[in-house]
Amino acid sequence: MATIRDVARLADVSVSTVSLVFSQPHRVSESTRLRVQQAVDHLEYRPNGTARDLRVRKTNTIGVLLHNLSGPFYSELIRGVEEVADMLGLTTIAAGCSSHQGQGSVRLLHEARIDGAIVLDPSIESKELLRYARESLPVVVLDRPLTHDFHSEYISAVAADHELGGYLAGNHLLDQGFRRFAFIAGPVDSGDSHLRHRGFFRALHRAEIDTVTIPVVYSDFTENGGKRAMGTLLEQGWKLDAIFAANDEMAIGAMQALEEHHVSVPNDVAVMGFDDIRLARYVTPSLSTIHQPMYEVGKTAMKKLEGALNGTSDGDVEILPVTLVTRSSTLAPLAKEGIS
């Protein structure tokens, strides 16, 4: 069985440097981290060897590895996870992505500090999850599909039907009579944003809308990001009557930008989001959106993880339905005239 000294010898570094790569990777140069990781992979080294193995599945702790611990999106997810975990006598620990590309979360996996993981963090690469997922450390992912090159009997997935949500959003805006659209997308590497984009454009295609001419601005799923994206669209002079943002926080940011430019929502431009966070119903005007059942996603993910911990990992994906929630932000002027 490989030891930390074997890793240090193969990587041509000191034992203390190897320890630093595990504990504080941002303090080590990228080239050194790469050499150490290659040595770890080659030797199939795990910290503390047999001592670690004796603790397998004895921590009674589940890791919820998130991209960002702030914001309203994650609270319902964590609540769903914790409800099931509490009934099972398990403790949950939530870890957010740091500026060092999820190294803190990866360290939890590498050092086997947890018995299982629920992962909603695109900064943790799929190859990392494939490396650490095993019978004693099953993983449920919430942010990526189970593709042919990302498959393991110890990795399963839960997701809301993001493509259907985008399709419902497109149909709703079309039914309201809007025809000049823009899409504010999440990060380029966000699978969820991509699916919402695809569903939205599919609805517009069916209505014979030329989607090639529709502007798509990528942002970061935050209010400030949505505000910046909307500012870009306004500065570029796009003539729009409806905005679909890939999440509610960006939609609310877009509404702020429109207000600052004295553009009325929805009289001049309609705005629609995705997620149905609690704030969506309280902003003015209230935000039309797609309800994503994050509480149910959290519960379902934890139940899947429970099965895996009991040796019945299925390695498949479960898709949960989404629903359309219509509020004032997409109420077309013609529709408003019909209200007494």
Image: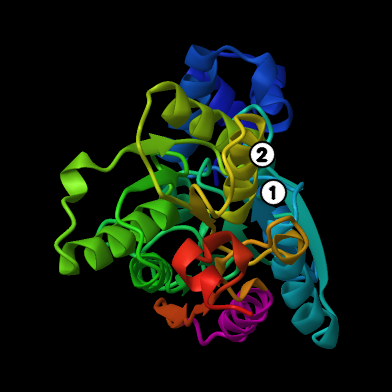
Q: Nearer the viewer, mark 1 or mark 2?
A: 2
Q: Which mark is residue 256?
A: 2
Residue 337 image offset from top left, x and y in percent:
53, 71
Q: Secondary structure at mark 2?
A: helix
Residue 302 image offset from top left, x and y in percent:
66, 77
For the C terminus, give its image quadrant: bottom right
- Residue, disc 1: 108
From the viewer's perspective, is residue 96 above or below residue 297?
A: above
Q: Amino acid at mark 1?
A: Leu
- Crowding at dot 2, Cα within 10 Å, few <14 / some 14-19 / many 20+, comes out as many
- Crowding at dot 1, Cα within 10 Å, few <14 / some 14-19 / many 20+, comes out as some
Magenta stretch, residue numbers: 295-313
Of marks 1 and 2, which one's residue comes earlier in the chain?
A: 1
**Quadrant of residue 101 within the rendered picture:** top right
288 with respect to 107 (left or right): left
299 with respect to 244 (left or right): right
177 with respect to 232 (left or right): left
Q: Secondary structure at mark 1?
A: helix
Which of 250/206 is in front? Answer: 206
From the viewer's perspective, is residue 214 above or below residue 11?
A: below
From the viewer's perspective, is residue 298 above or below residue 307?
A: above
Q: Amino acid at mark 2?
A: Gln
Look at the image and tell me whether residue 258 can be seen: yes
Which of 129/200 is in front? Answer: 200
Residue 174 image offset from top left, x and y in percent:
33, 67
From the viewer's perspective, is residue 3 above or below residue 30?
A: below
Residue 298 image offset from top left, x and y in percent:
66, 74
Q: Are marks 1 and 2 in contact (CB under 8 Å)?
A: no
**Quadrant of residue 175 within the rendered picture:** bottom left
Give the residue at x 40% y 35%: 217
**Quadrant of residue 228 within the rendered picture:** top right
